[in-house]
Image (cartoon, helix red, strand yellow):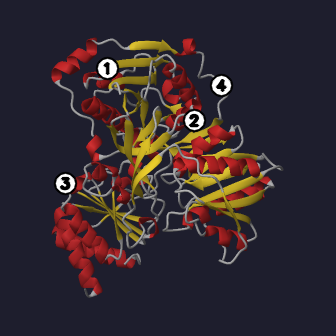
Amino acid sequence: MSAPHVVVLLKDILDPELPGSRFRIDPGRLEPAEGVGSAILGPFERSALELALKLKDAVGARVTALSVGDPGVLDGLRKALAVRVDAAIQVGLKGAANLPPEATAELLVAALGRLVDVDLVVAGRQAGDWDHGQVAYLLAEALGWPCVGLVRRARYEGDELQVLHDHAGGQRLVSVPSPAVLTVTNDDALLLRMARVSDLMAAQRRPIERFEASELGSGSSTPGFKIADLWVPARTSVCEFIPGEGPEEQAVNAVRRLQEMRLL
Amino acid sequence: MSGIGTVLAVGWGDGASDRPGAEALGGALAVAAKLGLTAVYASLGDPPEPGAEAAAASGVRALAVRGGAGDAESLTAQIVALVEEFAAVVVLIAADDRGRQLAPRVAARAGGVGVNNATALEVIEGSLHVTRPVFGGKAMCRLVPLRVPAVVSLRSRTFEPAPGAPGGSVEVRSMPVQSRVRLIENIPPVLEEEHLEDARVVVSGGRGMGDAEAFAALEELAGALGGVLGASLAAVDQGWVSPSRQVGLTGKVVSPELYVAVGISGASQHLAGLASGVVLAINKDAKAPIFESAQLGLIGDAKLLVPALISAVRATRGG
């Protein structure tokens, strides 16, 4: 077969390393407060990108990075260009980070309709902001394509796509007909590679194609749910630090305290 | 949402536990009572998950569906057929590896809406309200599905398992298996002696453990305490521990009496996997966020404190 065309879905999300103590809500909009943290490429999207790059290494797959995002929020697409994807496309939409999953999936279906001969779509298992874990599955259903979730490895054996994925506490190696959608889970073999310095610089100059959401004519259907409330849970715990001169004494005191609390 | 239709609870067999299905049924009974609907239970997979008999014994219409290796493709088609047959307006499933995939897929095919990782369900003025963690557990969100069926995956411990005894009368039927995905090789799970989710004591390690070898000492501590080894996402990502040990938003939810967190910073993503229990945190950084969520704290080097704890526990227990 000719080299497969792999589209990797990326999303820039509120930095997941932002400490909980600094997280703030905008109570009027029921969204994270503006400016509470920076937007970076999500961790599961990084794994999805690495899986796509491995297919490029192995069989010369053509990789297109596609992201629905706020105009100007381009961390993921720039990172993707720096690790040498073949093309980067942004569906520009203000407020994209808080778009419901169905609307995001609709926009992605419309955007994929503009691309030629897509063999495979790979996405992170969930965006680490709203954690809906839905977009890739909704996309597969809308396209009528088979979908395999929680993938750790993918390879082409001739024309056949084989993937290893989590299933019922174990794993399965399966054959998936193309075109297909895969969601990718975190795996130590899928840590995103480092970009070369020269590629990092070149990525700033490479073009990012823009599809305007308004032109795609999608993404505005009736939402499936409304958000009634969003809040930060109160932290009520007060930590009792166990004293001791050195680890042995600390350990003995800790064990005594656990016994007093009837935990031992 | 009130008055017409059913609340469908679905369980599937993994050969290990029928608790996820029983919890889904517990939720279905609670929601159905508030909406004035009836609950139906379906057990899928091969072999069928054993909860159907218990459901039937408690007076619920229960089905055991035979056939299929139970991949997400075939389960989706089977659940959609059941949704149509029973006019389900709410579908409850476990938020495990398969359930989180099924919620959006079933909802999409049935014209409804999926919601993943619910930690609470309420009925307010006849409408279902679903609470779930967002932003890696830093915040909670309550949302209202606007279409039916609402297909909701439930985090473990959201509901108590429905009570029931074996021996109920179950409708057994076969449903076609429709999967475009072909199985080449099945790698079954390594069966653990005790399930992380059911453990009374969990000892988890994080990035601060430094290497895979340090987890051997943690496993020893877990053994001395009569508990089970867990881990944070960071430790799993490093390849130090099997992903099946991961506690957190994308891993397992545990509810031990005692949770020992060693070298774990305390990211919300990790804490979202802790449903209850006293937390004993061990960290060399006194300012680590884990101490904001811990009841007991030990500040120091885990490589020294863990062996000292093993000795102290064994001395107490006469081991």
Left or right of B302 in this view: A10: right
Chain ID of residue with mark 3 = B
Left or right of A83 in this view: B134: right
| Distance between mark 2 and mark 4 Cα atoms | 16 Å
Residue B21's quadrant in the figure? bottom right
Could you say where residue A85 lies in the image, as x and y percent from the top left?
A: 30, 23
Q: Identify residue for label 4.
A: A221
- Tags 3 and 2 on a common chain: no
Q: Residue at x 23, y 78 (%)?
A: B312
- Tags 3 and 1 on a common chain: no
User: Which one is in front, B176 or A75?
Assistant: B176
| Cβ–Cβ under 8 Å for marks 3 and 4 | no
Chain ID of residue with mark 2 = A
| Distance between mark 3 and mark 2 Cα atoms | 42 Å
Q: Residue at x 39, y 52 (%)?
A: B270
Query: Which amino acid type is marked by label 2?
Result: Glu
| Cβ–Cβ under 8 Å for marks 4 and 1 | no
Mark 2 neighbour class, 10 Å CA radius: few under 14, some 14 to 19, many 20 or more = many
Query: Which amino acid type is marked by label 4?
Result: Ser
Question: Does dot 3 land on a helix, a strand or a loop?
Answer: loop
Q: Is residue A148 above or below residue B243?
A: above
Chain ID of residue with mark 1 = A
Question: Does dot 2 land on a helix, a strand or a loop?
Answer: helix
Q: Quadrant of the N terminus of chain A?
A: top left
| Distance between mark 4 and mark 1 Cα atoms | 32 Å
